[in-house]
Image (cartoon, helix red, strand yellow):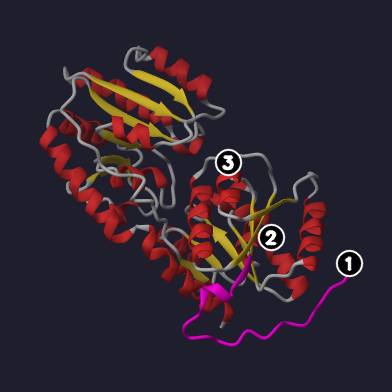
Amino acid sequence: MEICCARPAFPFVPMLDLSRLNIGFLAGTLGQGGAERQLFYWLRALKQSGAQLRLFCLTSGEFWEEPLRDLGIRITWIGQHQSRLWRLARLIDELRRDRPAIIQSQHFYTNLYVSAAARVFGLREVGALRNDCLSEVQSIGQTMGNLSLRLPRFIAANSQTAVSRATELGVSNDRLHLIGNVVDTAHFMPVSRAANEPVRIAAIGRLVRQKRFDRLLSVLAQLRAQSPHPFRVVIAGDGPLRERLEKQSAELNLQNTVRFIGAVADSREIYREAEIVVLTSDWEGTPNVVLEAMASGLPVVATKVGDLPNFVDEGETGYLARTEDEQKLVAALLKLLHNPNLREALGRRAREQIVARHSPQQLPQRLQNLYEAVLA
């Protein structure tokens, strides 16, 4: 393997022209996750700005592949082999033929690939923190996790929680750049909602331990026991815990209240039919589900995780509770169940807040700030 030690010159440009950028992105997956949706928003914004883009991926044939190709993004699959070294060699071979100025990771577990490839060619690299930092480090093992956190010379994080925890672990603050998640506010919009009997509640996410749908089912059982007001719940998403959760739902006698509908291609219709959205995760960064729900004019009841306290205002746009406080989640849902005017008011303010702080129109400036720092 030929190793180039020379670093190209990257003069500081105070007002970087995004159309002059050539960036290669590496994604671990293009499945239906929040990180993948944010990747689509990033690439769309950069493409519209005229940047030259290429995407490498460890998997193929997944949900976001077709929408990204429709944007004109060239996608190369480098995951034909399970060996990390083989995948790295494949990435290096591809970069040797078509070398960008920046190579960027979209998932935490792909940070080591871009860090190694950048050092081979003297490129600038950007790693990723897509959650709360600690859970990401632990998810791939302490040694690999620490290397994935410390090797990238720049890291784009989607939550202040991740930035704070990374600095607590010894990462220099000047390497960390907060790029908050955005939501397509033209796609996720409020609709006219008549007061319904029963009230419709939605929860969306992968059926995995992090999302704690078992906690949600426990809360729903308590809610039904404490309120005569009828409600129905849709759980949209799939994952390894589905069978266990369906069994728990049956044991709690929730079969006529809760419906598991599996993964959906476009969650917009779920929000349009809902009046309340619930999230009961143990950890998050900036969850897309909450942003989309608020953009759709819905009040949110959620656990107090990640950056949710930064944009869910208690009693103004939704309600938050500590992860162990199921009773507060129940109390918040009771309040919303019995008060359609409160649901409407919270949802209206939620929409206003998301439009002001998390719309895609703000993304180009944030990306420009990131890449100016990377190329300085």
Q: Given this view, does label 2 or label 3 mark the residue nearer the observer?
A: 3
Residue 1, label in figure: 1
Residue 112, label in figure: 2
Q: Which residues are magenta?
A: 1-23
- Mark 1 or mark 2, which has the lower sequence index? 1
Q: Considering depth in this image, is 272 or 317 the residue closer to the camera?
A: 272
The answer to whether the residues at label 2 and label 3 have Cβ atoms under 8 Å apart is: no
Q: Is residue 312 above or below residue 299?
A: below
Secondary structure found at label 2: helix
Is residue 169 visible to us here?
A: no
Residue type at mark 2: give it. Leu
Residue type at mark 3: give it. Gly
How would you classify the magenta stretch by its main secondary structure? loop
The answer to whether the residues at label 1 and label 2 have Cβ atoms under 8 Å apart is: no
Query: At x 18% / y 44%, what residue is drawn?
Result: 346
Q: Given this view, does label 1 or label 2 mark the residue nearer the observer?
A: 1
Q: Is residue 124 above or below residue 104?
A: below
Is residue 19 a member of the stretch shown in magenta? yes
Query: At x 72% / y 82%, what residue is drawn?
Result: 7
Is residue 268 a member of the stretch shown in magenta? no
- Mark 2 or mark 3, which has the lower sequence index? 3
Secondary structure found at label 1: loop
Q: Is residue 101 left or right of residue 160?
A: right
Within 10 Å of the Cα at label 3, are there few (<14), some (14-19), or many (20+) other Cα atoms? some
Q: CA distance from mark 3 to mark 1?
A: 32 Å
